[in-house]
Image (tube, rainbow, N blue to C red):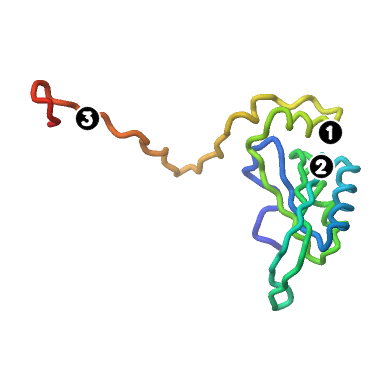
Amino acid sequence: MTPYPLEPIRAVGPARLVLSSYPSRAAAQAAVRGAVEARLAACGTVVDGASQYWWKGKVVEANEAIVLFKTVPKRAGALFAYLRAHHPYAVPEILEIDLPRVDDGYLRYLARTIDAEAPPPPLGGGSTRRAAPRDRGARAPGRTRARHRLRSRGTGTPP
């Protein structure tokens, strides 16, 4: 059992970016097509890359294709399950990134594309930054501006 949670606890953004690497561009494009047709992702971008990683006790170098899947929070879990079930690697790399800021127009596109029956997302949420919740014992950040100095009258020099 893993010591890491399976669901992101502090994810607050209106969208998710899911990354996964594949052994070939063809395998990556097939994964994108399946995820998009199943409406688990609005789109997927395939990027060619070179990887180095530990595998079975040695460092391996390989050309891979990395896919950036764009999705909404309620589809991220299903996208993970789909990628895991259809991935050609024995131990697939599947990573999720919470996106706290997303352009309003792109957010509408994601929502319409993935779930046409869903109500429109709240707008304005993509243009401001939301802070993560602070731990109980955390202190508020200190002052960021210098304190104002008082000048003595008449001499023109600080006290």
* Residue drawn where x is 78% and y is 65% of the image: 91
Quarter-wise, where is residue 143 in the image?
top left
Which label sits on residue 149? 3
Q: Give the secondary structure at mark 1.
A: helix
Name the quadrant of the C terminus.
Answer: top left
Direction from residue 149 to residue 114 in the image, left or right: right
- Marks 2,1: beta carbons within 8 A: yes
Quarter-wise, where is residue 16 in the image?
top right
Q: Give the secondary structure at mark 2.
A: strand
* Residue drawn where x is 82% and y is 30% of the image: 112
Q: Position of residue 50 (x, y in %)?
A: 72, 63
Q: Count the marks.
A: 3
The residue sitting at the top extreme is: 154
| Looking at the image, residue 2 lies above or below residue 145 | below
Tag 3: residue type? Arg
Taking depth in this image into account, of 46 and 12 the one nearest to the observer is 46
Q: Position of residue 78 (x, y in %)?
A: 82, 46
Badge 2: residue crowd in 10 Å (few <14, some 14–19, many ≥20): many
Q: Earlier in the sequence, mark 2 or mark 1?
A: 2
Q: Give the secondary structure at mark 3.
A: loop
Tag 1: residue type? Thr
Q: Position of residue 157 (x, y in %)?
A: 12, 29
Which residue, given by chain and number where applicable, does mark 2 sit on?
A: 43
Which label sits on residue 59? none
Which residue, given by chain and number where applicable, does mark 1 sit on?
A: 113
* Residue drawn where x is 86% and y is 52% of the image: 29
